[in-house]
Image: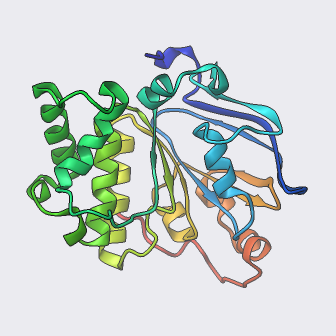
């Protein structure tokens, strides 16, 4: 397992990526560590999703480098990556009515493989993950019958069961109603307080202001701003990213 002291949780260095001749990322790069929530803001096509896919090793950059705790991600095995980094996709509905605890148990595959029967330790870790996220009462409910917000929390519990301390989330609040958005953001702040590092994309500047320690604004594959939410999420930035005038994008109160 990689050691936390080996380097920053995640470091992206001068990443370039093209798709069918179109430049998607043009020299993007930043570092982040545990205890941070870093939000990526940008319009559709800005390069946010590509940056996430590069960060988790799903695709390789045309040039540049991704380091996970100081180690080039291209040199690491899938198992080593999974022990340090967990990816949380947008909430989805499973094709079969697995129980929520079975979905969370999938996080143990990185440790056990496909064919090993879950051990007592695995079951204990799953129970702890469900309790940590506050959805232990849903353990035996069919995943297909819980709400979108509860499914998203189950996916985060699955990531915790994986044992990783760095979470990468793709638009975690997509499709959630206001109540579930707030509950989700509260859980992310809680995890940050417990020492997790969180990198997420969002289309909600108010979410970025409310929970992030840093906000990175992307435009045309380049990092336009990188800093504290109060410095990045401004009327000028919102206009430059989305082409709309917003009088005061920071009037939203923090979700406590």
In the rendering, at what x and y percent does residue 247 appear? 66, 83
Res 89 visible: yes
Please state if 152 lies on the left or on the right of 239 as rendered.
Answer: left
Instruction: Say whether residue 256 is visible.
Output: no
Q: Quadrant of residue 162?
A: top left
Residue 44, x across and y down, in percent: 69, 70
Residue placed most toward the observer, 251 or 16 = 16
Q: Is residue 163 shown above or below 255? A: above
Give whichever of 97, 49 is nearer the camera. 97
Q: Nearer the viewer, residue 109 or 193?
A: 109
Which residue is depicted at the point 34% across and 67% down?
93
Vertical placement of 145 versus 41: above or below? below
Image x and y of residue 161, in percent: 28, 37
Answer with the quarter of the image where residue 230 lies.
Answer: bottom right
Residue extending furthest right? 21
Q: Quadrant of residue 19?
A: bottom right
Q: Residue at x 63, y 26 (%)?
A: 73
Residue 143 shown left or right of residue 173 in the figure: left
> Which image quarter holds the C terminus?
bottom left
Assign the N terminus to one quadrant of the image: top left
Instruction: State left or right for residue 174 relative to residue 47.
Output: left
Image vertical order of residue 71 relative to residue 106, above or below: above
Instruction: Tell me residue 165's x, y (percent).
Output: 41, 33
Closer-to-camera residue (75/13): 75
What residue lies at 54% left-to-right and 22% top-to-bottom?
77
């Amino acid at each position: 397992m990689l050691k936390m002291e080996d380097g920053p949780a995640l470091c992206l260095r001068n990443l370039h990526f093209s798709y069918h001749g179109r430049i998607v990322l043009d020299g993007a790069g930043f570092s982040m560590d545990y205890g941070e929530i870093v939000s990526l803001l940008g319009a559709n096509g800005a390069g946010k999703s590509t940056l996430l896919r590069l960060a988790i090793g799903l695709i390789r950059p045309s040039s540049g480098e991704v380091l996970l705790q100081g180690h080039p991600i291209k040199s690491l095995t899938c198992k080593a990556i999974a022990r340090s980094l967990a990816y949380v996709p947008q909430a989805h509905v499973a094709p079969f009515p697995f129980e929520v605890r079975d979905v969370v148990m999938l996080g143990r595959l990185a440790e056990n493989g496909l064919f090993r029967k879950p051990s007592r330790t695995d079951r204990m870790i799953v129970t702890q993950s469900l309790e940590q996220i506050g959805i232990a009462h849903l353990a035996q409910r069919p995943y297909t019958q819980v709400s979108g917000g509860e499914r998203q929390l189950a996916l985060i519990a699955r990531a915790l069961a994986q044992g990783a301390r760095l979470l990468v989330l793709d638009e975690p609040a997509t499709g959630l109603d206001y109540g579930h958005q707030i509950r989700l953001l509260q859980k992310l702040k809680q995890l940050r307080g417990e020492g997790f590092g969180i990198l997420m994309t969002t289309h909600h500047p108010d979410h970025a202001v409310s929970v992030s320690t840093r906000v990175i604004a992307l435009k045309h594959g380049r990092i336009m701003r990188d800093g504290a939410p109060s410095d990045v999420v401004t009327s000028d930035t919102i206009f430059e990213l989305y082409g709309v005038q917003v009088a005061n994008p920071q009037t939203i109160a923090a979700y406590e």
